[in-house]
Each structure stands twice: as C-alpha cells, then as structure tokens.
Image: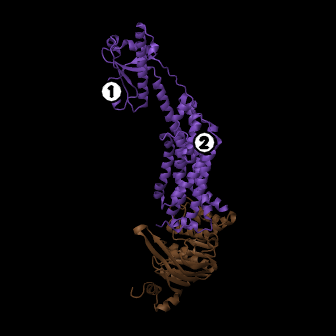
C-alpha cells in the first residue's frame, strides 16, 4: 500500500509538471463545454429568429398585390431580395429563401389558371430550408383561402375537399426538441474523459520505456499490481479532473445561453452535473485502464499515440452509432461502454425517466472490464518481451 | 556474495520470415566475493548486460542458477531485488522531477521514508559530489550528472550487493575519477560490487577479479595477474584480446 501511494504520488507530481497534460485538461475542460453550448444556442436562436422572422423576401412583389396583401395580413413584412440573390444562394452565401413571382401572376390567378411560383433556397443551410418551408406554408395558406372562396361562390361546402383533418399531438418528453441538438453534450463529456487521460496514460507506460526508466523501476522490490494500480489511479485522476471541468463548464455555460428555448431545455444544474459525473465516473476508470493497456505495447510516444487513437475514435463514434442505426433506447446498449453512458445521459437531457439500473449496469460493466484490463497489465509487466519491447 | 552458475538465455526476435533466435548467453559462471570489485569484461554483444539482467531478476534464465547473498534469483526475486542496487544501462531518470525527487521515489518504493530517507539522500549527494544539483530538475543534466543521480538512486537503500552496467560510459575524466573513488569506498565498506566494462585501464586499476565473457560464455575468471600469467602477456588488453577473440587479432 505504501508503494502504491509512492507510485501514485510520483505520477501525479510528474503529470502536474507536464505542460502537455495541463494544456489538454484546461483546453478540453474550459473551452469545449462553453463553445459547444454557445454554438448550439447561436444555431438555435438563429434558426428560431429566421423561422419567426416577420420579413419575407418576394421577388417581383408588384405582380402579386393580392398575395402581398395576404402576407401582410399574416403580419409579415414583404421585402425585395437583393438583385444577385440566385448567385448568392448558389455560392452558399445566403441564409434565407426567396419567393419568385412571375409576371402577370395576378391576372393569371384571376382567370383561374394554374399558376406556378418558385421558392429558391439553399438545401445545405438549415436556416434557408426553414425559411423556404415558411414561404411554402404561407403561399399554400393563401391558395387555400382563395380556393375556399371560389367553392363558396359556387355553393359548394369546402369541407368536401378536406374529408380528413389531422391533429398532431406530442407525447414524448417535453424537452424533446432541444434534446435532439443536445446529443453533443454527452459526446463532448465522453470524449473529454478520454482526452484528459490520454497524455498521462501514454507517459506512464510507453513514455516510461522510451526514457529507459522502466527497467530500473522494475528492479525495485515492488509488486506489478502496486505499480499498475498506482499509475492507473494517477491516470484516472487526470480523466476525472478533465471530466469534472467539462461538466462544470457546461453548468456555467448553461447560465450564459442566449436562447430561451435552449436554456429551458438545458436544465443543467448541480444535480444534473452530479448525475453526469456518476454515470461517467466508472467510464473514466475504464478508459484510463484501456489507454494504459494499449500504450503498454508501444515502444514510444509516437507508437502509443497511434495505438490509443483507436480508443479515442471508438468513443467518439459509439454515441453516434445509436443515432445513425436508429437504435432508439435499446436496452442492450447499457452493456456497451460509451453507448450505455451516452444513452442514459441522452435520456436525462430529454427528460425521459432514468432508473437506478440504467446507471448501475453500465457502471458495473465498466468496473468489470477495468479489472480485466488492470490484471492483464500486471501479467504483461512480467513479460520480458514487454519490458524490453522486443519482437 | 554473488554466485552465477552456468546461466544460459535465448531470445527470439521478429516474426514470421524475420524470426531469429539469438543465443545471448550460452554458459556464464563466476563468483563475486564481498568486499571486492569484480569486473565483467567483454566485447560488445558478449552477453554482459543480459547476464546482469538475469542476476537482477529482470530476465529469467533458460538454465543455470544465480544467487545473490545466497538467495536464488528465480525463486525469490523480491528478496533479491531488495538486496541489490542496480545501475542499469538505461539510466532512466524522470526529467520533470528534481534529483532529490528521483532518489526519494526509489527510496519510498523500497519502504524508506521520513527524515531517515532525507538524511540518506543528503549524504549520498555529498558522497557523490552533486549537492548543488539536488533540487534541480534533471532535465538538461550532463551524462556525468545523470549518472551520479542514477547511482545515488541505486544506492539509496544501502544495498549489500551492487551491479553496475558500464558505469563510466560517456563520462569525462573528472567524473570517471570521482566514480572510481566512490566504487573503492563502497568496496572498502564490505560491499560486493560487479561491474561490466570494456575499458582496460579502469578494470586494471579497480578490480580484484576479472571475468572475461565472449560469445556468451565465461572464457576466464581470476585476478588480473592470473590472467596475464595464463596468457603470457604483460598488459591486460593483450591478455583480454587473446582470451576473448583468440590469437592473431
């Protein structure tokens, strides 16, 4: 126990003095959280402000006075788009949509002809798409109004044209809409746990061999278990500090969010932060042990960075898998590290119920795998091929 | 006393078509008594480092045996490690730690601590003449300075047996002389010292006993004088060349 403490103390001191470790911890923890949230909130508020903008762009509005009158009755302001709007949209530099009215529109409508109008937008820009949908809805609204008037004049009940009426009722968790965007938050927290542990995990394994200190170290009468566990605890500490920093910075950033919808959805206070740490704590332990295990086979920092990059990639991909594969909340995901944590945290953000076993099962899986990874390392440290990096 | 009897060790390197078997040590035997310095003399690749690694329990011998102070290195490796101080080929200091912290770490791993450990560190720094460096980080230390810290680290628990792998490698004259003085002092305090080298004058000036290792085998074991007498040469170098490489080199 005294030896384990000596190893932990040394590795923490060594890590604290390693500028690379600090840079990563600080950058990840203090920057990623607020940046993610501010980007999200800006995105959301831009989206909403465009969606609810009172201004609509109509090209050749003079040709459609009745339509303009309808738009103004819907409390919209009709403006003319810039002259080069088509070029701008094509160049991807226009965040709005434009209604193109052909010449002679009003007369054609009056004569009962089928008239085509066009809505130009950029399918790659979310704001532009939303604006296009708004325009389409407005034009349809006017067309329907016109149609109803024509039917009434002919003495036909307009209801004949609408035999079915659809009412959309939302039953899911109330925070649903914003949670779709907040999937990034668990992802950033998961990755921060890995990034925080990375530099120090490599240093205590491959780094130890690269600087030639592993051989003298192993000549001390220390059990492999004390060495491995002491080093692992130091790595866990770095991982947990980074994670806590990231989670803390989310909590602070939550106070700065501009968008009302988002700040209402992103209820990230002390209890949510505590819950996130409880869910991700065991994950930090696992990631620390896995990074050490994979770096133990490397001859130096460079090799170790290559071999640990698989873990970094897996952790960043796993959460998106459940989204792309439409796994919804399939319970088996609880058994897969990173996916399980992501699922539980996503449920929390959505406001869906989370049971105790949702927290305990992924935690237990992480702890069991951690024990296996640590045990493997104690065995590997006794192998000459590992100590001297042969073959 | 360190007793080594018929040690052998084979390594395999590479995989598939690149696979190669290396007979690093094919039968090394020697005895290193207490209160004496025993030199392992041999050309590069003769098996000196592997032999020292087997004695220090890092590498398991394929056959043969070795005892440190009567304790077997295979069956009781923890005890052997506790009794040994090793200055390995790789000095391996932690560059972000000060000299003092480097030595303290090993002291703590060996169960030392408190004021006794600090006193021990101070006296080693005094003995090895690096007191002004004690609180500086070891990053940027010269080869000689690194060696002194690594040696102090190996001696922190005052071991009865000391193994040194080519300790004067890369040292300037002044540092090499300081190291030799230190080794003599250790010998006079009754310790058993084994060191590998290929510097003849050093071996001749320091060592009571010489073990010549070539191609993984012990070619000769005895005093410098016995060695010269056996080969009929007047210099240790000539005698060594004849025993290690055969006549006509």
Report in which chain the residue with disc 2 lies: A
Report in which chain the residue with disc 1 lies: A
Left or right placement of residue B200 versus residue A68 in this view: right
* Residue placed under numbered mark 2 in the picture: A276
Color theme of the render:
by chain
Callout 1: SS = helix
Question: As displayed, is residue A86 above or below residue A189?
Answer: above
Q: Residue at x 53, y 81 (%)?
A: B39
Q: Residue B1 location, x and y as percent?
A: 62, 81
Q: Colour of chain B?
A: brown
Callout 2: SS = helix
Q: Residue A30 location, x and y as percent?
A: 54, 42
* Residue placed under numbered mark 1 in the picture: A86
Q: Colour of chain A?
A: purple
Q: Gap between marks 2 and 1, in whole Å? A: 47 Å
Q: Residue A58 location, x and y as percent?
A: 37, 19
Q: Could you say which is closer to the camera, residue B187 or residue A351?
A: A351
Q: Could you say which is closer to the camera, residue B231 or residue A318?
A: A318
Q: Could you say which is closer to the camera, residue B234 or residue A32?
A: A32
Q: Earlier in the sequence, mark 2 or mark 1?
A: 1
């Amino acid at each position: 126990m005294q030896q384990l403490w000596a190893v932990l103390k040394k590795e923490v001191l060594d890590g604290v003095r390693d500028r690379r470790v600090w840079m990563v911890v600080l950058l990840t923890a203090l920057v990623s959280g607020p940046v993610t949230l501010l980007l999200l909130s800006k995105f959301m508020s831009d989206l909403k402000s465009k969606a609810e903008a009172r201004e609509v762009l109509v090209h050749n509005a003079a040709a459609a006075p009745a339509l303009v009158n309808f738009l103004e009755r819907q409390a919209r302001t009709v403006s003319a788009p810039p002259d080069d709007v088509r070029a701008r949209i094509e160049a991807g530099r226009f965040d709005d949509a434009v209604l193109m009215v052909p010449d002679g529109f009003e007369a054609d409508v009056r004569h009962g002809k089928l008239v085509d109008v066009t809505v130009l937008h950029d399918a790659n820009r979310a704001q532009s798409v939303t604006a296009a949908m708004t325009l389409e809805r407005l034009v349809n609204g006017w067309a329907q109004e016109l149609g109803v008037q024509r039917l009434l004049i002919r003495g036909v009940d307009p209801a004949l044209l609408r035999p079915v009426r659809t009412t959309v009722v939302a039953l899911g968790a109330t925070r649903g809409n914003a949670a779709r965007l907040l999937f990034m938050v668990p992802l950033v927290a998961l990755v921060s746990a890995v990034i925080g542990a990375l530099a120090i995990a490599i240093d205590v394994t491959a780094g130890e061999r690269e600087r030639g200190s592993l051989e003298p170290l192993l000549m001390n009468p220390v059990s492999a278990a004390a060495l491995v566990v002491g080093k692992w605890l130091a790595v866990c500490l770095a991982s947990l500090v980074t994670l806590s920093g990231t989670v803390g910075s989310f909590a602070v950033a939550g106070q700065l969010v501009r968008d009302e919808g988002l700040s209402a959805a992103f209820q990230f206070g002390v209890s949510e932060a505590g819950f996130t740490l409880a869910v991700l704590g065991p994950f930090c332990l696992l990631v620390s042990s896995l990074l050490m295990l994979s770096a133990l086979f490397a001859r130096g920092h460079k090799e170790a960075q290559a071999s640990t990059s698989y873990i970094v990639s897996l952790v960043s991909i796993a959460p998106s898998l459940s989204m792309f594969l439409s796994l919804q909340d399939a319970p088996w995901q609880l058994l897969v590290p990173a996916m399980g944590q992501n699922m539980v945290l996503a449920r929390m953000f959505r406001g869906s119920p989370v049971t105790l076993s949702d927290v305990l099962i992924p935690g237990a899986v992480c702890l069991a795998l951690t024990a296996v990874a640590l045990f493997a390392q104690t065995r590997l440290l006794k192998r000459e091929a590992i100590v001297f990096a042969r073959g | 006393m360190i007793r080594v009897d018929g040690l052998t060790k084979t390594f395999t390197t590479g995989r598939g078509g690149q696979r190669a078997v290396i007979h690093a040590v094919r039968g090394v035997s020697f005895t290193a008594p207490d209160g004496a310095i025993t030199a392992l003399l041999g050309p590069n690749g003769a098996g000196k480092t592997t032999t020292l690694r087997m004695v220090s329990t890092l590498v398991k011998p394929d056959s043969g045996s070795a005892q440190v102070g009567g304790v077997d290195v295979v069956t009781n490796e923890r005890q052997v490690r506790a009794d040994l101080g090793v200055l390995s080929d790789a000095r391996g200091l932690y560059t972000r730690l000060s000299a003092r912290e480097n030595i303290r770490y090993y002291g703590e791993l060996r169960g030392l601590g408190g004021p006794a450990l600090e006193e021990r560190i101070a006296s080693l720094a005094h003995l090895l003449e690096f007191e002004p460096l004690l609180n500086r980080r070891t990053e940027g230390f010269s080869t000689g300075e690194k060696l002194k810290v690594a040696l102090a680290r190996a001696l922190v628990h005052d071991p009865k047996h000391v193994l040194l792998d080519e300790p004067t490698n890369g040292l300037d004259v002044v540092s090499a002389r300081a190291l030799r003085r230190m080794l003599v002092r250790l010998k006079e305090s009754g310790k058993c010292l084994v060191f590998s080298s290929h510097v003849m004058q050093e071996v001749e000036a320091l060592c009571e006993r010489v073990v010549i290792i070539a191609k993984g085998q012990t070619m000769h074991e005895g005093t410098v004088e016995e060695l010269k007498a056996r080969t009929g040469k007047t210099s240790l170098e000539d005698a060594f060349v004849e025993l290690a490489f055969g006549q006509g080199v």
